Image (cartoon, coloured by chain):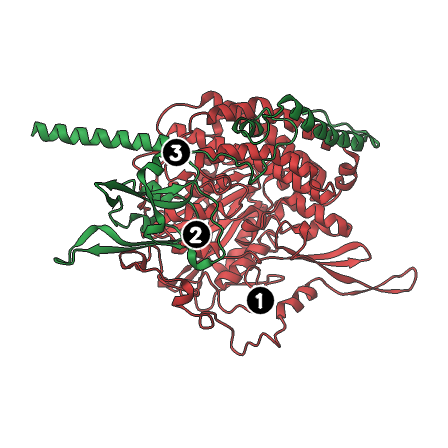
Chain colours: A red, B green
Amino acid sequence: MTDQNTALETDLTYIFPDAVLRDERANYEGYIVKRELLTSIMLRLRDDLGYDYLSSLTGVDYLPDNMMEVVYHIRKSTGGSPLVLKAQVDRDDPVIPSVVSIYPGAEFQEREAWDLLGIKFEGHPDLRRILMWEGFSGHPLRKDWKEPYYEEDGKPFKSRWPAGYYKSSEEKNPLGTNVDFPAGFNPESWVPEPEVALYAGLGKMERHDEETGINTEQVIVNLGPQHPSTHGVFRMAAKLDGETIVGLKPVMGYLHRNHEKIGERNTFLGIMPYTDRLDYFNSMSNNFGYALAVEKLMGIAPPERAEYLRVMMAELTRIVNHLALFGFLLNDLGAYFTPFLYAFEERELILDIFEAVSGSRMMCNYFRFGGVARDLPDGALDKVKGLVFDRLPRKIDDLDLYITNNEIVRYRSEGVGVLTPEQALAYSTVGPVLRASGVPYDLRRAQPYSIYNRFDFDVAVRYHGDVYDRYLIRLDEMYQSLRILEQVIKDLPEGPIQEGKPQYQVRVPPGEAYGCVEGPKGELGFYVISTGKPNPWRYHVRAPSFINLTPLEAMCIGSKIADVVVILGSIDLVLGETDR
Amino acid sequence: MSEQKNAYMYGLGVLKTLGLAFRHFLETYLDDLRHLGKRYRTSEGISYRSSKDVSGIFTIQYPEEKLPVPEEFRFIPFLIYEEKEGKVEYRCTSCGICAKVCPPQCIWIVRSSDPNTGRPIPDPEEFYIDIDICMNCGFCSEYCPFDAIKMDHNYELATYDRKSNVYDKAKLGRPLTYYASVRPINYEREETARREAEEQRAARKAHA
């Protein structure tokens, strides 16, 4: 898989001799592109060289060099590891051409980079803040930005040991002096500018009906942020013509806590339990992705048994996620909470296993660099066997029997929220959303990580790209996960579960790494830059449920307002990950 | 999976799912009869209701019944002390590893020093944990080299006052016997390892 990629990588400086330089920094990969030629190179890469899929886009603040860098990971939908491109700009005037016209999937990611790092993307159709609130001043991921209650640049804080003597944050910094407002800010008279921009972004409000000669006015309906259908605090500003959606803009960030800044302040190991809180349904696969990224930097690999345990947990969590999704999706369809609880019964039994193995049902914190935290306790394997060989196949068959051909489910979901394969790729969707649109792209096959190349399974794919296929694909994936689990249980070797001695202060050599897994929601990537210190210099999460929202408007236009709820449900988002 | 039928079921699907709910309802009562007097408020009933063979209702009637937590369950750390000759001796040496590894930095330790010499002594003067901030990750107990801090099983910590949620040394302390009762397997393993290490040391000393 990687071979074809390296063959091409050697070519890139030949193809663009004047525009591309190899990134020569130690332990860095990819190329540095001249910023003026960025869009033309991207266009060539997409159209002539097959890099049709933008996986991740983020920025890095190199404060000591007074330089900002935008990092692009682009992929071929046929597989292989990503091609890494970087464009560098001056930190005082960070302006870079937008690639939204080439990869529409960059829309939200560029907005995020603008919001958190203050990099301007020229030519972006709607460059507003996305995660921070509208009146916020500054760009929090810049290295010289300091949060309220700021103590030190990196943990561990000296005040904890040996100084001691507990002080709460409020005592340290009384309320009123710890919040930064823009100059002249008055909350009484303040009208959020982007609110106006948000509505303006939805387009013009009046329509003239040719047949009747009547002018009709379109209305804006805000769904959320407090709405039971939005799976958390998420808002959609929808413009309606009658009952039909003609425009829709998602508004997010209500659960934003700047996970990435917390990560950059924390030690490498200390980030691990924080990753649990991203997509709180799938802490196991969040741990997995982060562990892979740091292990890549450290150049270590876990022992055999740990690899098998990792895959076992990752596949169990996939089943947990899809079961939960079924419950929520049926809730959205109006089957209020009864099917939800039937699905949660199975989920509960899997969570019991997680609890016995890792100590916590949802915040597992089970993976360590070069292994896992602890071995299976007595009886846990029997429980897994009981579920995999007996109960789960039976119960998933039940779901299939009762839901798949239920007429309400089919009427409500067939042909709703259609995403064509071309759109799905262009909008950088991942996971079940991409595969339901007929693109058989699964990282477990496209860029095999851990030991997935040993297992026999099929990449599930469906072709209609509607909500119903997005439901079916999850059913298929659960059967495939069971298949993988059967093989894992059969081959599970004895042996150590941790490479070397467990260490609380890991030494991570300087460099960059991008670790990614096929999480239940799609490609979950962690981009980590180390400078050799105990804390990472940059820690970025490529969140599937954030980027999967990019085509939401495209999916919703033309459908009825009641279908928006179902379409959103079928994307499968968790706000902990979307807002980070 | 079953072949996807092209024809809709025209109302049959709705009846089928209603039937499923009704079956579930009936099973609950049939299961009650089958396990008469044993299904509720007994430990075997609870373990049955969280096993793969359960049918009917599976919920646990908290707080009358409680799900037993597995040994590895972790919730808020405690400090282990041993009572030797009537004196309470904490295992903690205030080395500070737990405070350094703690991801949200909720552990505050004050080292104590000998009043005569001013040299630090291996016993913490104060030990605070802000349990509002603690995220129950278990790193402190995982990386403690002296097995001095361990994760508790008690999860019923609701209070009316947030201020009382900063636990000091006295509130965090638990006797070794308590640890042995909540985590018997871990306790046994650590004690065996300690005994072996001591025997080795003794053997080496005898050899020298």
Which chain is home to disc 1?
A
- Where A351 falls versus A559 (above or below)? above
Compute the Cα span from label 2 to label 1.
24 Å
Q: Residues within 10 Å of mark 3 (few under 14, many from 20)?
A: some
Q: Whole-percent x and y of residue A548?
A: 61, 48
Q: Position of residue B23 (x, y in %)?
A: 73, 27
Q: Do the residues marked 2 and 1 share a common chain?
A: yes
Q: Specify the subunit that label 3 lies on.
A: A
Name which residue type carries label 2. Tyr
Q: Is residue A445 visible?
A: no
Q: Name the residue tied to disc 3.
A: A374
- From the image, state whether disc 2 or disc 1 is nearer to you: 1
Residue A363 appears in the figure = yes
Q: Quadrant of residue A223?
A: bottom right
Residue A134 — which label? Answer: 1
Q: Against B61, is A193 above or below?
A: below
Say if mark 2 contacts mark 3, CB within 8 Å: no
Q: As drawn, is A316 to the left or to the right of A325?
A: left
Q: Secondary structure at mark 2?
A: strand
Gap between marks 1 and 3, in whole Å?
45 Å
**Circle 1 or circle 3, nearest the eye:** 3
Residue type marked 1: Glu
Q: Give whichever of discs 2 and 3 has the lower sequence position.
A: 3
What residue is at 43 percent from the left and 70 percent from the top?
A174
Picture residue at 61% right of the left edge, 35% below the top = B59
| Residue type beneath disc 3 | Arg
Residue bearing the label numbered 2: A539
Same chain for labels 1 and 3? Say yes or no: yes
Residue B61 to residue A219: above or below = above
Secondary element at image label 1: loop
- Using residue A202 as the reference point, say whether residue A120 is left or right of it: left
